[in-house]
Image (cartoon, helix red, strand yellow):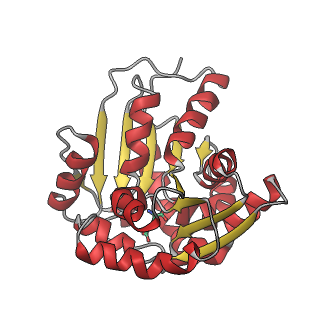
């Protein structure tokens, strides 16, 4: 048993979609969450910058005595995971592998779509992972950068988000995909809107549930599961109000985020 908390981070509110699944799968784990609200979005930044920000965040999480870190961000998972596991000596779990595996379980025709930030799509991480796992799969990708500010603003299902989704997703729908991976943790916040645009015949794959399942398996194998009350603390690098508001809406419980100086780490 290991009663230290699990650290989870993202550029902003997106990683809360992963926290939601961790709470379901691992109700006895305490969580320390960090959302980099001062520096969001990560998806338009370089690999070097994303890696530097992520290192600072993991150092902050380590100062909170975490036993493992979940990178609840596809941009960081796709671009910086290899560097981060070299730098830090603790279990680090990423979201791309669980996302690719969940997608392959669901697709029937093996024609799949992946949407994500510019940096995730440019890295080709999903395509490589999917083809590595199944060389017969055909992958179509599309960067949807505006979904991130829409999610951060809480505009998840209105005319603007719908029109944005229509413009972004049109070309993928013409390819005959039967599944689409939400390759950015912000996107499940727009799931309803995305669902209306892509229709019932395309399955929506959110890597979060599979990530939570893998985390449980991983901690169990290390004999490091916790036996806590499932307390969560939230930290951000800028204004707390909007984050706390969205956090409450996503997790359906009172969340009061605290601001910290992430540059110090
Ligand atoms: N939620 C993140 C992801 O999964 C990052 C979005 C962003 O900051 O651009 O990629």
The residue nearer to you, when weighing 249 against 72, is: 249
Picture mark count: 0
The answer to whether residue 93 is left or right of residue 247 is right
* Quadrant where the C terminus is found in the figure: bottom left
**Image quadrant, ligand 1:** bottom left
Residue at 29% across, 63% down: 237
| Image quadrant assignment for residue 129 | bottom right
For the residue pair 23 and 265, the one nearer the viewer reads as 23
Residues 20 and 63: in front is 20
Q: Judge whether 44 appears above or below 66 on screen.
A: below
Place residue 4 in its image quadrant: top left
Q: Residue furthest right?
A: 135
**At 55% across and 73% down in the image, what residue appears?**
173
Q: Is residue 134 left or right of residue 82?
A: right
Q: Position of residue 142 (x, y in %)?
A: 56, 76
Say whether residue 62 is left or right of residue 82.
left
Q: Whole-percent x and y of residue 226?
A: 47, 21
| Drawn side of residue 30 relative to residue 6, left or right | left
Say whether residue 80 is visible: yes
Residue shown at 26%/64% (left/top)? 157
Q: Position of residue 264 (x, y in %)?
A: 37, 63
Q: Quadrant of the N terminus?
A: top right
Q: Residue at (64%, 47%) from the top-left corner?
A: 106
Which of the 4 image quadrants contains residue 196? bottom left
Q: Is residue 64 visible?
A: no
Residue 54 in the image: state x and y as whole percent: 50, 62
């Amino acid at each position: 048993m290991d009663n230290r908390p699990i650290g989870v981070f993202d550029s902003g509110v997106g990683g809360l979609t992963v926290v939601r699944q961790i709470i379901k799968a691992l109700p006895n784990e305490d969580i320390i969450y960090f959302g980099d609200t001062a520096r969001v979005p990560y998806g338009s930044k370089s690999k070097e910058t994303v890696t530097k920000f992520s290192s600072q965040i993991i150092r902050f999480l380590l100062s909170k005595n975490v036993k493992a870190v979940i990178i609840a961000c596809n941009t960081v998972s796709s671009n910086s995971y290899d560097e981060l596991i070299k730098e830090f000596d603790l279990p680090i779990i990423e979201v791309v592998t669980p996302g690719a595996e969940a997608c392959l379980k669901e697709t029937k025709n093996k024609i799949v779509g992946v949407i994500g930030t510019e940096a995730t799509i440019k890295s080709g991480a999903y395509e490589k992972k999917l083809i590595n796992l199944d060389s017969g799969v055909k992958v179509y990708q599309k960067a949807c950068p505006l979904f991130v500010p829409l999610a951060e603003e809480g505009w998840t299902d209105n005319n603007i988000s719908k029109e944005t989704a229509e413009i972004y997703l049109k070309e993928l729908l013409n390819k005959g995909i039967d599944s689409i991976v939400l390759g950015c943790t912000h996107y499940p916040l727009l799931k309803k809107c995305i669902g209306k645009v892509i229709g019932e015949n395309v399955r929506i794959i959110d890597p979060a549930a599979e990530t939570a399942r893998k985390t449980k398996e991983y901690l169990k194998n290390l004999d490091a599961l916790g036996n806590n009350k499932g307390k969560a603390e939230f930290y951000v690098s800028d204004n707390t109000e909007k984050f706390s508001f969205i956090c409450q809406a996503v997790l359906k419980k009172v969340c009061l985020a605290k601001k910290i100086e992430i540059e110090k780490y």
